[in-house]
Amino acid sequence: MKRYFDDVLLGSIELFCFAAELGSFTAAAQAASVTPAAVSRSIARLEERLGVRLFVRTTRQIRLTDGGQRYFQQCRQALSQLTEAEREVTGGQSRPAGALRISAPTPYAHYRLLPLMGEFRKLYPEVTLDIHVSNRNIDFADEGYDLAIRGRSPADSNLIARKLEDAELVLVASPAYLKRAGKPKNIEDLAKHECIQFELPSTGKQIPWTFMVDGAQIDLPTTGGLCCAEDVLGIVTLARSGAGLVQTYRYIVEQDLARGDLVELLPQHGGTSRPFILLYPHARHLSLRVRTFVDFLVEKLPRS
């Protein structure tokens, strides 16, 4: 096997990560118990090896270039894996520790993920959680995420996809709207109603509603003068205010249904669902904190 790294280069990578995290060569030097000049030489050595600038330097501050940011995310992950491998071999990591960066879509984060995180932290206080609530697709390598929750399996074969649950869909409206517009008695009646739309961020297209008809699930395009994008919870707020009908996840509106603030419609055509999937990169030695987090979610969330 050809040798690509020596002790000096690995030390330079470690100092580079210190500088990137702390935003200062001086702070990196203090953290590593070396001189600022040693940090500067290490960064210069790396830039010469790679043929790219890693930092933009001014008299007052440093900041990563685009190439430096990508290199930092990869190096940070690699160093973390080396540390964890050493702890595992020596028996030093008996409990999960370290930072987890997680991306989750708005409704699933608010109604499923976030309510469980206090319990997770009580069980594993040495794991810190950086949770980004967003409906946009993320790049694991460039943005440094450890896990993501999404509503469909990825095309990327480098990701492991593990289903968390099949979330049931339900058609609802407020009593005030139904008093004004009447109840739909069948699917054909939906054409006479204000059907609140949601635009999928990844495609820019409005999501069709799904129903069970004669034992088969069908997609039905609907129309309406109200549309929300980015945040699914927006269409639920509109329905609660009496603006129209909406199809959403039952877990979002189950309390509204129990209180009578919303009414379930066309239950004879219900029973459809959409999956929520946990994604994380393939790794020969998956970190203990990632394994623990995955197992925790699978145990706590409703079964598929």
Image (tube, rainbow, N blue to C red):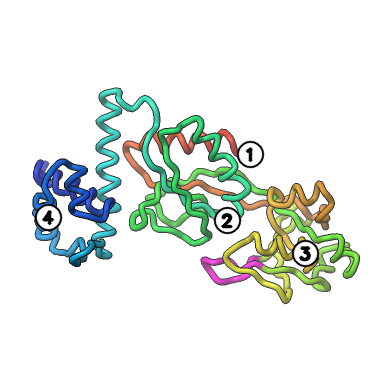
Report x, y in % for residue 276.
57, 49
Q: CA distance from mark 1 to mark 3?
A: 29 Å
In percent of width and height, residue 201 lies at 54, 66
Farthest residue in the bottom direction? 225
Residue 228: image tag: none
Query: Closer to the N terminus: mark 1 or mark 3?
Result: 3
Q: Nearer the viewer, residue 98 or 86?
A: 98
Which residue lies under the disc numbered 1?
302
Which disc is residue 40 wearing?
A: 4
State yes or no: discs 4 and 2 in contact (Cβ < 8 Å): no
Q: Are marks 1 and 3 in contact (CB under 8 Å)?
A: no
Q: Depth-wise, is mark 4 or mark 1 nearer the camera?
A: 4
What's the mark number on residue 241?
A: 3
Amino acid found under the numbered disc labelled 1: Pro
SS at mark 1 in the image: loop
Q: CA distance from mark 4 to mark 1?
A: 52 Å
Quadrant housing the C terminus: top right
Which of the 4 quarters of the picture holds residue 247? bottom right
Tell me which segment is drawn in magenta. 198-207
Q: CA distance from mark 3 to mark 2?
A: 20 Å
